[in-house]
Amino acid sequence: MGANSKALSISRETVRQIALTVDRYQVMRARHGKQVANAKRKPRAAGVVTTRPLERVELDHFLCDVHLVCGKTGAALGRPWLTLAVDHYSGMVVGYHLSFATPSAASVLAALRHAILPK
């Protein structure tokens, strides 16, 4: 800059406002490449979309956060496993199975049996 030129000063807030308008996907693509930018910044699909109840039922196993004790002897029985069958569309539990046995095909079958049979 020469002696006659006037210095241009920009506030920190102005720089911040300009930075907010920059597309972060484009910055990441320029720095790291298209694959990395797509993996980190591109929106994901919504996943499975269901349009009616019982179109899709999902099963999951949970180790209950409860330690059961025998009422007569006072012996510790352990922690039970809960297998749930949940309707994807409504989020409602349609069947379950509670057991001390670890999750297996038998617990899945029991939860599905509970879901299918009349209540």
Image (cartoon, rainbow, N blue to C red):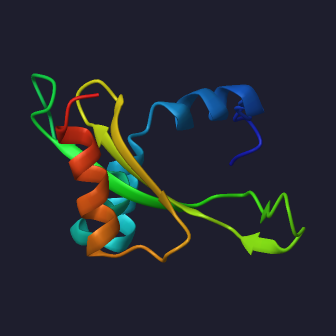
Image: 115 above or below 112: above
Q: Quadrant of the C terminus?
A: top left
Image: 18 above or below 57: above
- 109 left or right of 97 in image: left
Residue 72 sits in which quadrant?
bottom right
Asked if one can make out residue 76 in the rendered structure from this viewpoint, the answer is yes
Asked if one can make out residue 42 in the rendered structure from this viewpoint, the answer is no
Residue 6 sits in which quadrant?
top right
Query: Residue 5 placed where, x, y %?
Result: 69, 35
Instruction: Report the residue at 70% width, 46% height from top.
Output: 2
Identity of the residue furthest to the front in this view: 72
- 70 left or right of 81 in image: right
Instruction: Report the residue at 71% width, 30% height from top.
Output: 10
The total number of labels drawn is 0
Instruction: Report the residue at 35% width, 30% height from top.
Output: 91
Pick the front one: 111 or 119: 119
Pick the front one: 15 or 117: 117
Instruction: Report the residue at 36% width, 28% height from top.
Output: 92
Query: Residue 28 placed where, x, y %?
Result: 39, 60
Query: Residue 68 placed where, x, y %?
Result: 76, 61
Residue 75 sits in which quadrant?
bottom right
Pick the front one: 75 or 84: 75
Image: 14 above or below 111: above
- 38 left or right of 82 in image: left
- 50 left or right of 109 in image: left
Image: 52 above or below 84: above
